[in-house]
Image: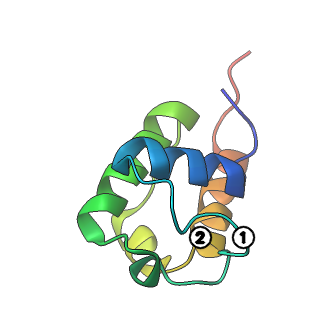
Amino acid sequence: MPTVFTLDDLRRILREGSGETDDLDGDILDLEFESLGYESLALLETTSRIEREFGVVLDDEAVAGAATPRALVELVNTQLVAAPQAG
């Protein structure tokens, strides 16, 4: 399992889930997902993909509060640090 979740990981997962390639390049860290065209259903799919790929469990309320890519990346990384490492 990866031990760090990056903005590039998030971009890739968003693109895989939506098929969209626009509006994710450049400085998007502090833009709200809604302004990027990602509504709650798209984010639900995104968090499911993150959980499967990175082996974390994301709290629904915490995800709902993560309105920007920066906040979601930080949330995932917090969970990665807290997750027990296989070994």
Which x, y percent locates residue 67? 48, 80
Which x, y percent locates residue 32? 50, 83
Local crowd size for mark 2, using a 10 Å CA cut-off: few (<14), some (14–19), many (≥20): many
Q: Nearer the viewer, mark 1 or mark 2?
A: 1
In the image, taking residue 36 as reference, residue 37 lies left or right, namely left
Which residue is found at the position 59% from the left and 70% from the top? 69
Q: Please name whichever residue, 34 or 66, is drawn nearer the observer in this view of the structure.
A: 34
Quadrant placement of the N terminus: top right
The relative height of residue 53 versus residue 23 in the rendered view (above or below) is: above
Q: Calculate the distance from the C-alpha at mark 1 to the C-alpha at mark 2.
A: 12 Å
Which x, y percent locates residue 36? 46, 76
* Labels 1 and 2: the sequence-earlier one: 1
Q: What residue type is labelled 1?
A: Gly
Residue 49 in view: yes
> Pointer 1: what residue?
26
Which residue is found at the position 61% from the left and 74% from the top? 71
